[in-house]
């Protein structure tokens, strides 16, 4: 089972307002990524999508979808609280399960790229993520990020505004062969931070 945890609880401090509820290309910003995630999950059939949010409007809008809304009233204390809430909602994890975290301010993600990332579970990586190359040809690792369920305790131990990429980097340093980069168009990894 792959537990897809969509982090839609940010405070949008740099943006100056709740950017997730901003209209972007005829849809609310958070809906772009959520629609791509659910489309990819539906194509696989072995995924559950959890939407972690502190925003009542976002939770209410997902009631009719096949998405489980997870409240996170402590999200203002940092992304680690949203990560913990998502892991707790997933419940008991089995050997071979995966956790995938995606952020709600990347409106250009495509279901095809997400599906390619999800498909890496056949190779049993410790971590995997969507990546692109910069102008110098160097690998730039982005979101979403996939983690083997064995890393759930390490992810749950994160504090403050420290996200899962720190866990991913630590494991890549220990064993680079346990990580898979799934390359996509750089535009898919761009996030919206300013109006």
Image (tube, helix red, strand yellow):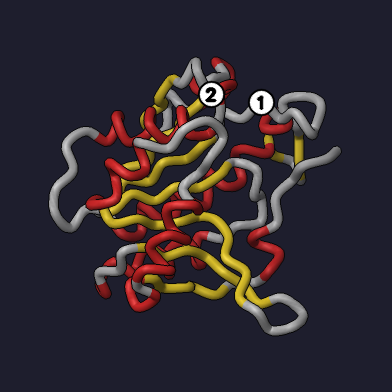
Return the mark for residue 152: none
Query: At 73% from the left edge and 32% from the top edge, which residue is drawn?
Result: 19
Residue that sits furthest to the bottom in the current view: 137
The picture places residue 161, in percent across and down from the top left corner, at: 56, 34
Towards the viewer: 13 or 22: 13
Does residue 183 lie above or below 105 as drawn? below
Disc 1 and disc 2 in contact, CB within 8 angstroms: yes
| Label 1 environment density (alpha carbons within 10 Å; few <14, some 14–19, many ≥20) | some
Residue that sits furthest to the right in the current view: 195
The picture places residue 57, in percent across and down from the top left corner, at: 58, 18
| Distance of label 1 from label 2 (alpha carbons) | 8 Å
Determine if residue 66 is in view.
no
| Quadrant for the C terminus in the image | top right
Find residue 14 and report its image quarter: top right
Report the side of 1 relative to 99 (left or right): left
Numbered disc 2: secondary structure: helix
What residue sits right under mark 2 in the picture? 75
Towards the viewer: 5 or 139: 139
Determine if residue 160 is in view.
yes
Numbered disc 1: secondary structure: loop
Does residue 110 lie above or below 48 as drawn? below
Return the mark for residue 11: 1
Query: At 35% from the left edge and 78% from the top edge, which residue is drawn?
Result: 177
């Amino acid at each position: 089972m792959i537990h897809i945890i969509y982090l839609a609880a940010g405070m949008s401090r740099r943006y100056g307002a709740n950017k997730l509820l901003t209209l972007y290309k005829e849809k609310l910003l958070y809906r772009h990524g959520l629609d791509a995630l659910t489309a990819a999950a539906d194509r696989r059939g072995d995924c559950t999508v959890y939407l972690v949010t502190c925003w009542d409007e976002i939770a209410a809008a997902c009631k009719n979808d096949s998405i489980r809304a997870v409240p996170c009233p402590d999200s203002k204390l940092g992304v680690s609280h949203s990560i913990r809430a998502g892991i707790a909602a997933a419940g008991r994890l089995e050997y071979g399960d995966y956790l995938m975290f995606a952020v709600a301010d990347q409106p250009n993600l495509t279901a095809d790229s997400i599906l390619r990332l999800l498909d890496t579970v056949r190779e049993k990586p410790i971590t995997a993520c969507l990546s692109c190359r910069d102008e110098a040809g160097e690998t730039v690792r982005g979101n979403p990020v996939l983690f083997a369920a064995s890393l759930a305790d390490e992810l749950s131990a994160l504090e403050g505004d420290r996200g899962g990429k720190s866990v991913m980097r630590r494991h890549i340093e220990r064993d680079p062969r346990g990580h898979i980069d799934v390359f996509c168009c750089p535009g898919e990894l761009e996030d919206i931070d300013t109006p």
